[in-house]
């Protein structure tokens, strides 16, 4: 996954989690956070320094989760979260460990 997309998603998750923890998130934000916790399971409660690694591993294992995660973040209706992920579509998510040249 592109590092800039992962960083934007991680940042948006951090912002939303802080809003929920402080009680400043609206109902849409709280609902989105519940969906995100379900999507990521126990990985959503790991220490902040481990969160990006856990998120990266989760999205590598299930790339289709990226689109669902982005949809949940956008559904939070938080302007701060929207600034981070509003322009990311992730319509085609490709993860490759090894790319070999094919000569034809």
Image (spheres, rainbow, N blue to C red):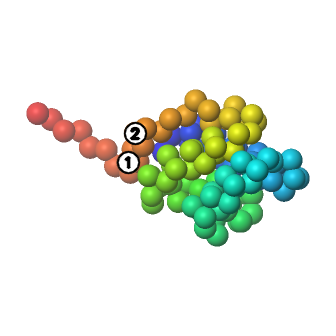
* Residue at (76% x, 36% y) in the render: 80
The CA distance from mark 1 to mark 2 is: 13 Å
* Residue at (60% x, 48% y) in the render: 72
On screen, residue 19 above or below 103 = below
Secondary element under disc 2, as helix, strand or loop, is loop
* Residue at (64% x, 70% y) in the render: 42
Name the residue tied to disc 2. Answer: 92
Question: Is any atom of residue 7 visible in this view?
Answer: no
Question: Is any atom of residue 45 visible in this view?
Answer: yes
Q: Position of residue 49 (x, y in %)?
A: 73, 57
Name the residue tied to disc 1. Answer: 96
In the rendered structure, the answer to whether residue 50 lies left or right of residue 19 reads left
Along the line of sight, which residue is nearer the eye, 88 or 34?
A: 34
**1 or 2: mark nearer the eye:** 2
Circle 2 packing at 10 Å, graded few (<14), some (14-19), many (20+), is few
Along the line of sight, which residue is nearer the eye, 42 or 95?
A: 42
In the rendered structure, the answer to whether residue 44 lies left or right of residue 4 reads right
């Amino acid at each position: 996954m592109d590092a800039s997309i992962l960083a934007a998603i991680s940042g948006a998750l951090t912002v939303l989690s802080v809003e929920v923890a402080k009680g400043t998130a609206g109902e849409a934000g709280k609902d989105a956070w519940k969906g995100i916790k379900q999507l990521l399971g126990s990985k959503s409660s790991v220490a902040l320094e481990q969160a990006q690694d856990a998120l990266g591993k989760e999205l590598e294992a299930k790339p289709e989760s990226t689109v669902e995660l982005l949809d949940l973040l956008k559904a939070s209706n938080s302007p701060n979260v929207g600034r981070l992920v509003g322009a990311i579509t992730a319509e085609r998510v490709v993860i490759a460990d090894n790319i070999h040249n094919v000569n034809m």
